[in-house]
Image (spheres, helix red, strand yellow):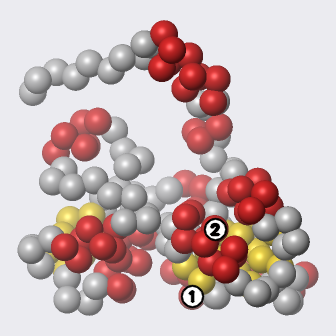
């Protein structure tokens, strides 16, 4: 999903972290070229060993910069907290997690868990949703590196005005 329209135009299928495993599993092909995120590609490959996932060398700049050292530091200061991370994190981070899942998966896991403390390894915007859904629980960001400036560019007022005034139409070449 986080790719240009030019990339999407060349793709057979566009997925999110929430549906990537399910969608790739449904494809009849055994070889899948997976773009743009090598970490999500690796995660999908681990879930689907019968498929040959060929990853592109790209990655999410936010998730990719979090390290195992960040995990060790967070776990040392919060020993009772469960670590929930996004599959776009590196293997080093994923290996140390208690749970790996999409944003929706992380929210569901934290909400259904009896645990009261969580270290969250994905973009910081999720913290508001988690706290609102679970006021009796504590949520800590794995690293201050987990801030995506691109995700902060569009505000709800922008969406409202685009819909109300029919703004920001995107017109593509037929080619």
Residue 145 visible in this rendered orientation of the protein: no
As measured in the structure, the alpha-carbon distance from the residue carrying label 2 to the one carrying label 1 is: 20 Å
Which secondary structure lies at badge 2? helix
State the residue at coordinates (55%, 71%): 105
**25 left or right, relative to 131:** left
Q: Is residue 110 visible?
A: yes
Measured from the top left, where is residue 65 in percent x and y? Answer: 61, 63
In the rendered image, residue 114, in percent from the top left (x then y), is placed at 76, 87
The residue at the point 51 percent across, 67 percent down is 102
Image vertical order of residue 163 relative to residue 24, above or below: above
Residue drawn at x 55%, y 26% is 159
Image side of residue 43 versus residue 77, left or right: left
**Sequence-wise, which precedes: disc 2 or disc 1?**
1
Label of residue 133 in the image: none
Residue at the spot of label 2: 107
Q: Quadrant of residue 4?
A: top left
**Where is mark 1, residue-wise?**
95
Q: Are marks 2 and 1 in contact (CB under 8 Å)?
A: no
Q: Using a 10 Å C-alpha cutoff, classify the residue at mark 1 as few (fewer than 14 neighbours), some (14 to 19) or many (20 or more).
A: few
**How many numbered tags mark residues here?**
2
Mark 2 surroundings: few (<14), some (14-19) or many (≥20) residues within 10 A: many
Q: Quadrant of the C terminus?
A: top left
Label 2 vs label 1, nearer the camera: 2
Q: In this orientation, which residue lies closer to the viewer: 83 or 144?
A: 83
Q: Is residue 146 above or below residue 54?
A: above
Q: Nearer the viewer, residue 64 or 130?
A: 130
Coordinates of residue 160 in the picture (x, y in percent): 57, 22
């Amino acid at each position: 999903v986080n790719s240009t329209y030019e990339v999407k135009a060349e793709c057979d299928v566009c997925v999110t972290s929430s549906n990537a495993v399910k969608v790739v599993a449904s494809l009849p092909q055994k070889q899948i070229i997976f773009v743009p995120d090598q970490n999500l590609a690796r995660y999908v490959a681990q879930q689907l060993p019968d498929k040959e996932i060929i990853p592109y060398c790209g990655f999410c700049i936010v998730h990719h910069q979090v390290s195992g050292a960040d995990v060790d530091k967070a776990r040392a200061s919060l020993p009772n907290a469960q670590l929930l991370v996004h599959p776009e994190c590196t293997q080093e981070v994923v290996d140390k997690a208690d749970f790996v899942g999409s944003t929706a998966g992380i929210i569901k896991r934290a909400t259904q868990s009896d645990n009261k403390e969580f270290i969250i390894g994905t973009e910081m915007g999720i913290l508001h949703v988690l706290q609102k859904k679970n006021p009796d629980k504590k949520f800590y960001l794995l690293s201050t590196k987990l801030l995506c400036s691109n995700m902060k560019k569009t505000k709800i007022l922008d969406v409202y005005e685009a819909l109300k005034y029919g703004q920001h139409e995107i017109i593509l070449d037929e080619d």
